[in-house]
Each structure stands twice: as structure tokens, then as C-alpha cells.
Amino acid sequence: MKKSISYTLMAAAALMAASVLFSSCEKVSPTGVLIGNTSVDDRVKQSLVNFSVLEVAWDKYLADTIQEYSFLVGSDSHITIDPGRLEEMLEIGMEHDDLFFCHLGDLADTKAEYYNNTEIAIEDATDEWMDKYLEPLVKEDGEIYQDTTLYYDPRTDCVYRKDEHNIFPTALPFYPVVGNHDITHNGWALFSRLFKTSFYEFTVRVICDNDTAYDRFIFLDSANGTLGSYQIDEIENGFFQRDNKKIRNTFTFTHTNIFRPSLNEFASTYCREELYYILDKLADWNTTIAFWGHVHAWDERDFGGVHHITMPSMNFVDHPNGGDDLLVRITVKKDGSYKMERVGLYSKQRTKEELEEQGYMVP
């Protein structure tokens, strides 16, 4: 009894401390940090329903003339009224011809206008991406298909409809995981309206020297600081092993970190048994790199045969002047090895007048 009272007092003290710590920041509240409005089990169940409804196609095919490809990873953008850092990330990726973009959660803080501005930024980037990469689909005789909404990416031979995508409603290959700030204050309703799912995977096929290789990309929901029983059951039932493909690399992405970058950072919230489970599963998958976010700090280490990268935040609050190393680019080479480089973001936060001129919602 004394022990339970002690734990209750400790929790109350932590909540009071959080309220003092965050009281000066309008976009963050104690409950927003500590409490989510949905469970991981509910989100994963909804994701599985969406898979069947959307009839998703999971493979991205790289043509045999492509020797390597790259993807860009960012984290914890915490978008409010200005999605400028997300815009910059997508622009940098398109300038470099990165194949796709990954985000490790806490994409936007949970107000409707913040997600509306996030959606506007993604829609604008989608238009730019389609103009740069997609061409009308033509028949062998050179005629354009009657269905003028059909386009394809000559780099990958992927076919798109102008208003659809293989996984998400937008054609832009932007793949986020859900973070704790994405699920507070009913934020999951906002996040899922845009991205439909918190738990998914796809593979990239590369054909080089008449040999077919697959790289697998796994996205896990850890927004509540746990994988949850339902998601673990799906993993154990073979959700990520539905085929007999020969996997060359596996890359995993999730929000809540395992390793603590420094003594003054938050420790992992996973219970010990689940922590062991995650580490064992990463080893079972022969994971090449496991990406983590949440603590807004860089950490890089090898453990259990897996390379772990915990990402810094890319938001204006932590980095008002930007920085040289807020993103990571992974280039996967022809032989399956990879090269990692840090990539900078430098845009400054815009005024309300500037945002209004560009069509964003300003409260």
C-alpha cells in the first residue's frame, strides 16, 4: 500500500514538473507529452483494415539500369503554422533524386490548422514531384492510354494514377511513422486522415547483373512507448514475412527510442521484456539500420549486429537557425552496401504575413 501511494505521489510530482516545464510553450501541454488518446492496438487494427480497403501494392521496382538509390530520413518536425522545414527536406530530396523520404514521427503538433498546413506542404511537393518524375503512360505503339490519369516513373517502372498512390493517397513517396505528439489531443484522427496507417512495410527490388535483390523497409508504431500486444502478434504471425523474397537489407523506422543519447535525455519507455523482444527481432530480421526519433538528439552505435541511429529534431524551436546535420541520407549501392551522410536544413521560420501569402492557414 505504501509503495502504491509512493508511486502515485511520484507520478503527480512528475506531472506538476512537466506543467511547469512546458507552461511557457503554447503548443505543448503536460498531457500532450504524457498521454495519448488512442492505443497502439487500435491504430494497428485500423491500419490492417485500411490495407485491405486500399488494396495496396507494396513493391517499388528499380529498373536494371539503376546501380544504386538513396533515401532521406528526418524526425520530430513538430510543425505548427510553418511547415518550412518539411518543405525544405522534400526540396533537398528532389534536388538529389532521392527515391523516397522517411519521417520518424512527431510530424506536426495536434491542431487542425497545423495538419492543414502540413497537408498543403505535402500537396505542393507532390505536384513538384509528379512534374519532375512522372510521364504519361504509353502503349507499345507509342499511343497514350485512353485513361489520361495513368502515369509512370521511368526510374522505377512504377505506375501511378494521378489521384492515387501505392500506399498513401498522395503520389509523393513520403513515409512517416506516428509519434506521441501525433496521437495526443485526438491527433490520430488528423494523422490517419492523411496517411491511413501507422504500421506497414514495402520492399525495393533492384535488378543488377541479371540478379534480383530486395531491400525491406519496416515501419512500426511505438507512439505510446510500446509496440503493444496486437502489433507483436501480427509480427509473430508473419506480417513482415508474407513472401519468399530474398532480402538483402532491412531498414526499420519507429518513433520511441531505445538507446539514450546522453545522461540528461529520456530513457527508453519500453518495458524490459519488450525491449529484449525488439532487439531480438531486429537481429532476426538481419536489420541493417534501425532508425529512432523522439529524444531530439543524435546517437549512433552498433549493438547486436545492428547499426542504430537516433535522429535529432528538425524543428524551428530546437534549431531556429537550422543545422548541418538534421537529416540523414542513406545511399544503397549496387553490391548492397550503404553510405550514410548527414544533411543540413537551414530555412528560417516565416512571418504570419509570409505564410498567408503562400496560402497557409494562420490563426
Image (cartoon, rainbow, N blue to C red):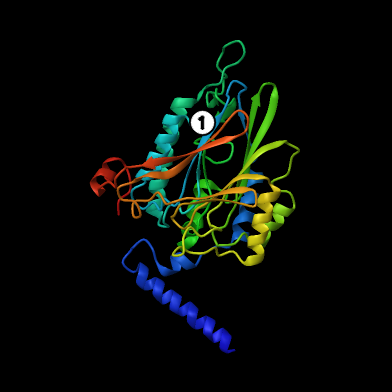
Measuring from the top left, give residue 170's x and y in whole percent. Answer: 50, 38
Residue picked out by circle 1: 162
Residue at the (45%, 63%) spot, across then down: 265
Q: Is residue 41 above or below residue 327?
A: below
Q: Is residue 334 visible?
A: yes
Where is residue 283? Give x, y as percent: 68, 50
Query: In the rendered image of this protein, does residue 92 appear above or below residue 255?
Result: above
Residue reaching furthest to the top: 141
Q: Quadrant of the image for the C terminus?
A: bottom left
Residue 100 visible within the image: no
In depth, the one of 14 and 45 nearer the eye is: 14
Q: Nearer the viewer, residue 278 or 111?
A: 278
Quadrant including the N terminus: bottom right
- Binning the other alpha carbons within 10 Å of mark 1 as few (below 14), some (14 to 19) or many (20 upward) gives some
Type of amino acid under label 1: Lys
Q: Establish if 59 lies above or below 182.
A: above
- Please, what secondary structure does the residue beneath circle 1 have? loop
* Residue closer to the observer: 138 or 246: 246
129 vs 277, nearest the viewer: 277
Residue 27 in the figure: left or right of residue 269: left
